[in-house]
Amino acid sequence: MSRFPRPGGIPDAPGVYRFRDAESRVIYVGKAKSLRSRLGSYFADARSLHPRTRSLMEAATDVDWTVVGSEVEALQLEYAWIKEFDPRFNVRYRDDKSYPYLAVTMGEEFPRALVTRGAKRTGTRYFGPYAHAWAIRGTLDALLRVFPVRTCSAGVFDRARRSGRPCLLADIGKCCAPCVGRVTPEEHRRVAEDLCGFLGGRARDFRRRLTAEMLEASAAQDYERAARLRDDIGALERAMERNSVVFDESVDADVIAMAGDELELAFEIFHVREGRIRGQRSYVVERVDDSDESELLGRLLVSVVDEAGDCAPEILVPQDVTADVVEWLAWRRGTRVDVRIPQRGAKRELLETARANAEQRLGLHKARRSGDLTSRSQALTQIQQALGLAQAPLRIETIDVSHLGGEGVVGSLVVFEDGAPRPREYRTFALSEEGARDDTAAIREIVLRRFRPRPESEEVARKPFAYPPQLLVVDGGQPQVRAAEAALRERGVTDVAVMGLAKRLEEVWLPTASQALILPRGSEGLYLLQRMRDEAHRVAIRYQRRTRTRRTRSALHGVPGLGPAKAKALLRAFGSVAGVRRATPAELQAVAGIGPQLADRIVAALAAESPTLDPPSEGHEGESEMLAPEVTG
């Protein structure tokens, strides 16, 4: 009997549900427009479920739900429960560092301005986040000339009160000295409120007000006061110039971009206020459930806006979010929020800049993770346990195949030792016609050539592989794995384990297994396997492009009368050298600049040119190309 309720007993209404494990811990929280439809999808045949969903259902023993009135209410309750229970199967938005904020402690009798990090406190207003603490300290120092609010700690403030002597900041005009009664608590609070107003987006109002007061003082011949006001305006402008100008002053927007792979996503957020980037923030997200990128983006928006307490009237995103998220943002802000995808102009360029930052952030995160010796050791141990190996695979080699429309098939082999790449031992393979039939044939040829015995007469200068790997990884499913294992047996190699990593669902395939293994999402073992697979793919694509360039040059650029411009026109018209080779003289003449005589020369030249890559030579170094290291971490 199923431990979960029948779909017919689940209400067909919006709501939030919680899955619990055997210890009654909440392990997943989700929302649904229809609880019956959504929960019913979890109770389908386990073989039809996504691997992440299958892992959730294997761990869950119970489910409960709460019906709400609308999708927006469901969104609110879902977010509240995720914060309360921190379920392990929900996505975790991990900020990659603690960003500094400028805080004003409006809950105190004498509000204080300070730079702070970490948890936020009730009664304190926060502005930011800023990318660097020095940037906000410089901004605050410039603003104190105009808004001389207290910045000292409670101990310094009490000591000044008892002694009746203010600190140096009061003497240089950067504190109005409420500690010794130079201003009343009400006057000091008004100064703090003005500072909050300036930081909150009313900078133009203060600048106009000070300009008007300066002109009045000048007209009244109060030149000393006019000079002070002039210097105050300059201080405000210097504080505003510390931020990058990207738009005119009327633009207030939050810009969110993302970059990621099957395991992780990086988000980059630019906070634009009055046309300037006033703050920047980054998140790295593990994909621990089966949410798509649009769902993850919506959840991030809810999380960030709830934490900040507000958002800009305009939010620029790389893809659409659901209507309930937009409605929740409008409810949270108290007015309409325009969430849109910029298509052109400066806003599109800023979104692309944020995306580039997200890509760099993800790369840095992966490099840091890969450089951690503890994480690498843990990854090798997890792979050993998952595959049932006698010992951790200290040397792992990964194979990938690349081609362009079935032409120019090449292969790559990358080497990782102790969980770290060894670029000097990478190999690339130009495959023969037999090896180019399909992926399985290509993998077979690569394995046969990799494990070919070295003749005794081979020159010492041709450096072979140092030693065989403990594990051979191929990009693909069971057909590719079986092809690699058969090639190993053909070479008499019996002490190398073989596995495949299927990219679509990140499944691990073994030669004799009836179904795939699923490593836990976010585990160090799966992360290492994915990194090796992606590195092999990168090397293969790079080599394939280089060989394609050589083939194009050798095939077309040697034809008399065919210059670079006409060669490019031919490739544009027919897609590839193979397409040009298949074209008739009449079809070639349809391309601008190609006459009858030149068309005949092209046909003759391509007929004499071999359509395949040069056959591989003998030996490890002769059959491969050493690649310069392009690996981070």
Image (cartoon, rainbow, N blue to C red):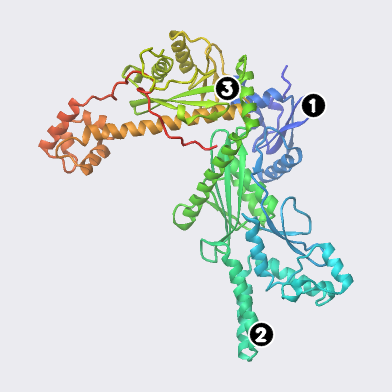
Looking at the rendered structure, the secondary structure element under dot 1 is: loop
Residue 256 x/y as whole percent:
56, 49
The quarter of the image holding the C terminus is top right
Q: Residue 23, which numbered label?
A: 1
| Crowding near the residue tagged with mark 1, few <14, some 14–19, many ≥20 C-alpha atoms within 10 Å | few
User: Of circles 3 and 2, which is in front?
Assistant: 3
Q: Is residue 107 left or right of residue 281?
A: right
Q: Outermost residue toward the left? A: 597
Kindly tell me whether residue 52 is visible in this rendering.
no
Please say if 193 is above or below 625: below
Q: Counting residues from the N terminus, which is met first, the one under dot 1 or under dot 2?
A: 1
On the image, which quarter does residue 13 sit in? Answer: top right
Q: Counting residues from the N terminus, which is met first, the one under dot 3 or under dot 2?
A: 2
- Real-space CA distance between mark 1 and mark 3, rounded to the nearest whole angstrom: 37 Å
Q: Which residue is under mark 2?
A: 225
| Crowding near the residue tagged with mark 2, few <14, some 14–19, many ≥20 C-alpha atoms within 10 Å | some
Q: Which residue is under mark 3?
A: 394
Q: Mark 3: which amino acid?
A: Leu
User: Of circles 1 and 3, which is in front?
Assistant: 3
Q: Outermost residue toward the front? A: 460
Camera-side residue: 143 or 250?
Answer: 143
Looking at the rendered structure, the secondary structure element under dot 2 is: helix
On the image, which quarter does residue 540 sit in? Answer: top left
Residue 25 x/y as whole percent:
77, 30
Camera-side residue: 108 or 134?
Answer: 134
Q: Is residue 414 left or right of residue 406?
A: right
